[in-house]
Amino acid sequence: MKSKTLFIALFLTIFSLNVFSQDKITISHQPYIQALTDSSLSIVWVTNKPAVAWVEIAPDDQSHFYAKERPKLYAARENDHVTYNVERGQKGLNATKYGYKTVGTVHQVDLKDLKPGTKYRYRVYNQEVLKHQGTRVQYGNFVATDVYSKEALTFTTPKPSDKVSFAILNDIHGKNDVLTNLIGQADMAKTDFVVFNGDMVDALISEDQMFNGFMDTAIKLFASEKPMYYSRGNHETRGPFAVAYPQYFPTSSGELYYMFTQGEACFIVLDGGEDKPDTDIEYSGIVDMDFYRVQQAEWLAKAVESPAYKNARYKIVICHMPPMGGWHGMIDIERQFVPILNKAGAQIMISGHLHKHVKQMPTAGVNFPILVNSNVNLVKAEITPQKAVFKVVDQQGKQVDEISLNPLR
Ligand SMILES: [Fe+2]
């Protein structure tokens, strides 16, 4: 009798554990800020189960987050660049693409018409979607970021014509300890944004591998509250999960090449593609990077004609692979991108890829300096109306090199 009771108790325990573990929706990868402009940004996060998703926004005033219901901005269809007007407080289904919320595990909410130079508080929220049965949708539990036992997450939109500080690192190849050390050398409280200049992992195999490789560390260190821009490296083009990459790192252009303005500087971020010829055994016949770079050059020729680029007092290019080194990808970058950048008065290109520090001053073919950052250093940059200074520091903070630029006018 006693053993029967024990058996039933054990069965109930296992049953309830199983039920509750199956029911539990969690945020498997915490929110991070992408595609920041002076008035818009995207917030991306991941749950372990399919769910509808939204962001609640509150001003950075003295009120408690629970003081009133905050505007809810829903994630719309995957990969659609749907925007919401935060300042007008639009909420609900009317803000979504074709009127639908997205049901998925990778959630992206794009906010627009934000005030420049303004701090906002936010919380991300999900409700699990269990199944669609006929016309009925069955929902499960909720999960949200904490605004009760700690302060809500925040982000701040940039001020125009302000001083800008940022940090660039690259070629981390999954070494979270190096990433942590380098971010430790940036004073993140005073840093406006971080650029990952490619090859953060060896290849993209799965969502977990990508987040374990660098992104969870980035989120823990800064990315929930400070924006991160990404220039895709050649290693992020490899592996079965590589095609999913754009879903996690949305940009303002909808492409992996894009531009943004911070302070008096216009940044052009390029995607150099792969380093070897497309037919190389390395790529198993799955890439067409030559054509991709031709398409990108067409975009670049138009981008440098935009007022944002033309009027900028500093013109900074970020591209994982530099136009040097003699391999096909780099030769093609020199052929496709450099003539446009030369003509458009680009002032500097910041690259990685070579795993060594190189400072190449202007040459007969390339009119601007190229700063190639190594895989163990950080570029700390400060741009003021008077000067743009790029300092290269190692993992202990010791300065390795420096380059500075004067404003164009
Ligand atoms: Fe690389």
Image (tube, grey):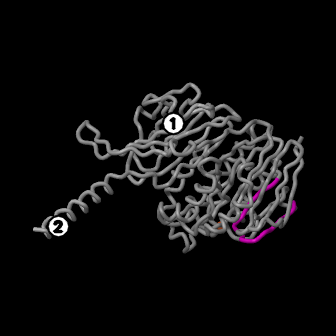
Q: Residue furthest left?
A: 1
Q: Which residue is mark 1?
A: 56
Q: Which residues are magenta?
A: 348-362
Locate residue 153: give its quadrant.
top right
Q: Position of residue 79 (x, y in %)?
A: 49, 45
Does residue 199 show up magenta in the picture? no
The tag earlier along the polypeptide, 1 or 2, is: 2
Q: Report the side of 392 relative to 27 (left or right).
A: right
Q: Residues within 10 Å of mark 2 (few under 14, many from 20)?
A: few
Q: Quadrant of the N terminus?
A: bottom left
Q: Is residue 263 visible?
A: yes
Q: Position of residue 246 (x, y in %)?
A: 54, 52
Q: Report the side of 63 relative to 297 (left or right).
A: left
Q: Residue furthest front?
A: 2
Q: Which residue is mark 2?
A: 7
Q: Residue 307 has which mark?
A: none
Does residue 360 show up magenta in the picture? yes
SS at mark 1? Answer: strand
Residue name at image x 62 percent, y 60 percent: 290
Real-space Cα separation, disc 1 to disc 2, in angstroms: 47 Å
Residue name at image x 69 percent, y 61 percent: 320
Q: Quadrant of the C terminus?
A: top right
Q: Residues within 10 Å of mark 1 (few under 14, many from 20)?
A: some
SS at mark 2? Answer: helix
Q: Residue furthest top?
A: 88
Q: Position of residue 346 (x, y in %)?
A: 81, 50
Name the amino acid, label 2: Phe
Image quarter for ligand 1 equals: bottom right
